[in-house]
């Protein structure tokens, strides 16, 4: 084993292999930085070249690409509040808060060093575990995976901020949003309201952009300042971040273990990992008061976990040929193009390729984190750019990213609807992490519960693995329960206030109506098709009724912010800029729409001269055009394109 | 002699004329694949793309463009709207594009009969069913197999799994499908885990992932689906010449040939889902010379050394259907008697609760 490890190391450093690795790493950094694009788009760019390539070079390149995406996706998460990929949504919570306090470089420094450790840990796990992992993966069947989903959901308590009942409802909402579309048991289309687009369900990228990017853009537009509002020396601090990581070494280690474990278990999906790690660190921290407001631990935890995930994720991919995430699915495709057939034979026979991957993973993490470190101080200055200039760019990137989900205008429409919903959610103090955790675990819970019952009846509850995970879940709930003892809130809310006309009441009412509609929808389907969303909704409605009539203490937390109708109008003005772009795109196509957006937004919000505005606009448009050219991506088309044939890029 | 010379001169000029008519040099051909990158259809198209580029007149750049959504119906609908193509957009479908069409899925706005003149390639594949050697050693144990409840991991009753479900049903096996599997890979792992007791894999996955299980005594093959040829006959799967195909198996255990609406509809769906699983189309109404350029190109590809060397590994030991033979195979796959279709829908509805 040691011998083949060393020879694989020599192999990767020899000849052009290393150059390909570096190329993969740089491409990975690039697609990682761009929100909405990630490993999958990077792979699509590389795929045409892979066929017929020397396998070692190709492997180095592919692994280099996936290894660094969870490192570099941190840039936009921290600096702009836009999740760089679905694996770094949780990083936004504290990372962006730190950036707003002028500590962007520190947050990035901590994130990259945590990523580096996580990535190396993942490589180590791959080396040690891959040979013996088969029984582990076979041990985790549907019953155990279901119970792991329950364990994940138990973190809602700590992720619900000031109001447990709001977190509970938000989580239920996430579960429902995740169950839209085809039912795992029967293939029936639920909550789709006849829309073919919704038949496929809502994708996690869309939810991530809607829940984090859109609300931040609206808030910043409303205030029209720079992202970082304190006059602090912004360029320094990455060293501080590095020190933070070293200080929190146990968190880094625990979250790396968590990340690689979630990676090893296919079926939980790649987008759960950051939320589980985040929930875990909040749960186990004594002082939880700063989470969500700029606690560095909230950056370190998800970042170490999401890099460790890739090493773990390679285990089932190589051993069974079953990919645990979208990235791994494409990587698997690349392997077969290279003529490498994953399966027991690959592991039990010649370990050469496996160890090439191990070293590529390790080296890529080092080079990737190093490059990102190098960039972080400079790039942090983005947070000093006046928001009037940055905003149109961010709106453009967010809409373009959302459009890549299925390349349909509906992607953007859904983004806007959910974005509006989540913007209010943020301002009404509803916990968005609870929504997200419900969403990412929805499919896991439903599918595996159904399968476990089909395979074992209710006896699945007594399997040893299930019992062990259940005990851990109880511990997790216990750890989280002390969060319920919160200090008294400023705003008191009484039952009779619920019947006053108030924008927050209307919002709450809409959520309850959605639950009721979902109950109704469930009865339109077969039992196994409708039971999951139906029961979730019923539980939500019953819980809320209980709180409403019997638990005044919890009820007082339902409206815990002073956000009035006039604030909402203000917010809508900011939101209308995004709406403006969407309407323009539907009419004239994306490119013409963003040109108009750039001009009008900058004319309104900045004092720049027309020449400067033109220069900024042209540079931005050129960037996005070049990007879509090299990555073979499309732009949204409008009515104009429907009637007239226009040359690229307007088509 | 004189006649021959004239004919050959005429052919020569026709060739030149044709070559002059279609030239893609400096152009880019976009190959639409209605599935995500990394999937079976994606790999298939990316395997073909560079060779197609070499074989087309003018050697255009051939790029694969993934457009997933709606279980491949969204992109197929989009492609169906294109008319009179210039040969710069082609579409690669799969069995999962054909089944919704055959089952009158409401999302389907495309019509395969409109592509009968513009189909240019059909790629067959196969599948092998297997079970556990704990209770089945050979055909002699068929009664034992029939007598016990079996569990089968499936993606859904209207997916390609319709073929195994119907095949098991006709054999009188008591198979209870457990739906919601995310593809064949997880179904196979569920079998290895012992959660399911009967399963099937497509050719390449069976070879690389189930064969080791067979060798170590953890799985035993039952039968292949066989391959329906362009004359509509079911033949043994050339990749697994030693394993009987389903119809043979049926005959050997029941002593009579399979028949009736169940078998007829099964055979049509087998043709659509496996024996001509992946096809390449140009937009309807595309000029015959462009269509012919593509058909010739695919003939050229399948005759090239590159292809011959790598085919068995990439696509299995299946003869690709090229030239004008493709029209016949499409017809075979899409011709389902209305009564048989009604029978099938009724079967799926009563048995698995799927509403149409």
Image (cartoon, coloured by chain):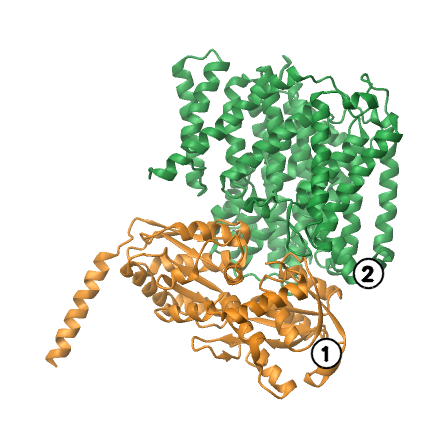
| Residue located at (70% from left, 18% from top) | A563
Place of residue A613 in the rendered image (x, y in percent of width and height, measured from the top left): 42, 18
- Residue ranking furthest to the left: B2
Image quadrant in which the N terminus of chain A is located = bottom right
**In this view of the protein, which residue sits in the foreground, A341 or A124?**
A341
Count the marks: 2
- Residue ranking furthest to the bottom: B255
**In this view of the protein, which residue sits in the foreground, A149 or A283?**
A149
Q: Are marks 2 and 1 in contact (CB under 8 Å)?
A: no
Q: Residues within 10 Å of mark 1 (few under 14, many from 20)?
A: some
Q: Which residue is mark 2?
A: A457
What secondary structure is marked by label 1? Answer: helix
Vertical placement of residue A339 versus B8, above or below: above
Horizontal side of residue A470 vs B256, given as left or right: right
Chain A: colour as depicted: green
- Do we see residue A83 in this rendering? no
| Residue located at (40% from left, 31% from top) | A588
CA–CA distance between discs 2 and 1? 22 Å
Horizontal side of residue A584 vs A530, given as left or right: left
Query: In which quadrant of the rendered view does residue B6 lie?
Result: bottom left
Chain B: colour as depicted: orange
Query: In which quadrant of the rendered view does residue A414 lie?
Result: top right
Q: Which residue is mark 1?
A: B146
Kindly indicate whether the residues beneath marks 2 and 1 are on one polypeptide chain: no
What secondary structure is marked by label 2? Answer: helix
Horizontal side of residue A275 vs A384, given as left or right: right
Image quadrant in which the C terminus of chain A is located = top left
Place of residue A535 in the rendered image (x, y in percent of width and height, measured from the top left): 77, 46
- Do we see residue A508 in this rendering? yes
| Residue located at (77% from left, 32% from top) | A167
């Amino acid at each position: 084993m040691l011998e083949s490890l060393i020879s694989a190391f020599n192999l990767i450093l020899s000849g052009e292999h290393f150059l390909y690795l570096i190329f993969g790493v740089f491409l990975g950094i690039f697609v990682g930085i761009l929100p909405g694009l990630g490993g999958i788009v990077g792979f699509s760019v590389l795929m045409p070249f892979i066929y017929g390539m020397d396998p070692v070079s190709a492997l180095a390149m592919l692994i280099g690409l996936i290894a660094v995406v969870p490192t570099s996706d941190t840039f936009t998460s921290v600096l702009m509040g836009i999740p760089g990929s679905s694996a770094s949504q949780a990083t936004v919570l504290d990372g962006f808060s730190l950036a707003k306090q002028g500590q962007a470089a520190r947050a990035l420094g901590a994130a990259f060093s945590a990523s580096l450790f996580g990535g190396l840990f993942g490589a180590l796990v791959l080396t040690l575990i891959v040979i013996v992992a088969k029984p582990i993966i076979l041990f985790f069947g549907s019953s155990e995976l279901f119970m792991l989903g329950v364990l994940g959901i138990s973190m809602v308590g700590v992720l619900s901020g000031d109001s447990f009942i709001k977190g509970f409802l938000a989580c239920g909402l996430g579960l429902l949003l995740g169950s839209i579309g085809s039912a795992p048991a029967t293939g029936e289309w639920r909550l789709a309201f006849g829309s073919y687009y919704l038949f496929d369900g809502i994708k996690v990228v869309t939810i991530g952009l809607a829940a984090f990017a859109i609300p931040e853009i609206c808030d910043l537009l409303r205030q029209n300042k720079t992202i970082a509002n304190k006059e602090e020396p912004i360029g320094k601090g990455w060293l501080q971040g590095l020190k933070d990581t070293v200080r929190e070494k146990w968190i880094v280690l625990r979250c790396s273990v968590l990340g690689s474990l979630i990676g090893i278990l296919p079926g939980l999906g790649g987008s759960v990992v950051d939320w589980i790690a985040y929930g875990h660190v909040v749960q186990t921290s004594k002082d939880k008061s700063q989470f969500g407001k700029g606690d560095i631990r909230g950056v370190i935890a998800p970042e170490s976990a999401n890099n460790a995930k890739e090493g773990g994720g390679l285990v089932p991919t190589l051993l069974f040929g079953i990919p645990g995430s979208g990235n791994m699915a494409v990587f698997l495709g690349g392997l077969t193009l290279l003529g490498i057939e994953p399966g027991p034979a690959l592991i039990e026979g010649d370990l050469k390729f496996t160890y090439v991957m191990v070293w590529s993973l390790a080296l890529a993490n080092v080079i990737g984190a190093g490059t990102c470190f190098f960039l972080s101080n400079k790039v942090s200055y983005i947070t000093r750019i006046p928001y009037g200039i940055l905003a149109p760019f961010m709106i453009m990137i967010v809409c373009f990213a959302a459009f890549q989900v299925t390349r349909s205008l509906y992607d953007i429409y859904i983004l806007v609807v959910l974005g509006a919903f989540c913007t209010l959610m943020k301002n009404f103090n509803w916990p968005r992490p609870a929504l997200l955790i419900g969403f990412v675990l929805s499919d896991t819970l439903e599918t595996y519960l159904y399968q476990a019952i089909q395979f074992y009846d209710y006896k699945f509850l007594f399997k040893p693995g299930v019992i062990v995970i259940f005990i851990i879940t109880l511990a997790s709930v216990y750890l989280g329960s002390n969060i319920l003892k919160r200090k008294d809130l400023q705003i008191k809310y009484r039952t009779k206030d619920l019947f006053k006309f108030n924008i927050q009441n209307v919002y709450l009412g809409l959520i309850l109506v959605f639950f009721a509609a979902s109950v109704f929808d469930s009865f339109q389907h077969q039992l196994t098709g409708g039971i999951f969303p139906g029961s979730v909704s019923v539980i939500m409605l019953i819980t809320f009724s209980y709180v409403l009539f019997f638990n005044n203490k919890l009820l007082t937390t339902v409206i815990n912010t002073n956000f009035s109708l006039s604030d909402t109008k203000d917010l809508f003005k900011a939101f209308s800029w995004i709406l403006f772009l969407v309407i323009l795109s539907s009419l004239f196509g994306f490119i013409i729409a963003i040109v108009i957006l750039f001009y009008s937004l900058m004319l309104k919000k900045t004092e720049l001269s027309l020449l400067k505005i033109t220069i900024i606009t042209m540079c931005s448009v050129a960037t996005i055009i070049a990007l879509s050219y090299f990555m073979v991506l499309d732009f949204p088309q409008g009515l104009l394109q429907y009637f007239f044939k226009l040359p690229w890029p307007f088509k | 002699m004189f006649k021959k010379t004239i004919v050959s001169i005429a052919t020569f000029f026709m060739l030149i004329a044709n070559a002059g008519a279609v030239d893609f040099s400096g152009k880019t051909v976009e190959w639409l694949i209605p599935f995500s990158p990394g999937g079976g259809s994606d790999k298939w198209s990316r395997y073909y793309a560079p060779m197609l580029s070499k074989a087309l007149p003018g050697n255009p750049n051939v790029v694969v463009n993934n457009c997933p959504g709606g279980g491949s119906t969204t992109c197929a609908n989009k492609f169906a709207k294109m008319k009179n193509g210039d040969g710069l957009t082609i579409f690669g479908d799969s069995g999962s594009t054909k089944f919704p069409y055959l089952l009158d899925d409401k999302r389907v706005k495309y019509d395969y009969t409109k592509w009968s003149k513009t189909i240019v390639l059909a790629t067959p594949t196969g599948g092998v069913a297997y079970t556990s050697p704990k209770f089945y050693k050979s055909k002699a144990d068929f009664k034992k197999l029939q007598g016990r409840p079996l569990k089968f991991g499936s993606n859904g009753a209207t997916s390609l799994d319709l073929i195994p479900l119907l095949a098991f049903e006709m054999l009188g096996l008591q198979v209870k499908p457990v739906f919601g599997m995310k593809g064949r890979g997880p179904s196979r792992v569920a079998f290895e885990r012992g959660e399911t007791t009967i399963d099937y894999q497509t050719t390449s996955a069976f070879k690389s992932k189930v064969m080791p299980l067979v060798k170590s005594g953890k799985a035993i093959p039952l039968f292949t689906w066989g391959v329906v040829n362009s004359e509509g006959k079911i033949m043994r799967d050339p990749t697994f010449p030693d394993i009987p195909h389903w119809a043979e198996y049926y005959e050997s255990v029941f002593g009579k040939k399979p028949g009736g609406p169940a078998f007829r509809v099964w055979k049509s769906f087998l043709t659509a889902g496996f024996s001509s699983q992946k096809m390449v189309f140009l937009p309807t109404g595309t000029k015959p010379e462009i269509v012919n350029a593509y058909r010739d190109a695919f003939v050229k590809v399948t005759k090239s050394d590159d292809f011959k060397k790598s085919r068995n590994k990439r696509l299995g030991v299946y003869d690709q259907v090229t030239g004008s033979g493709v029209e016949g195979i499409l017809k075979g796959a899409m011709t389902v008697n209305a009564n048989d279709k009604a029978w099938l829908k009724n079967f799926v509805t009563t048995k698995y609760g799927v509403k149409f």
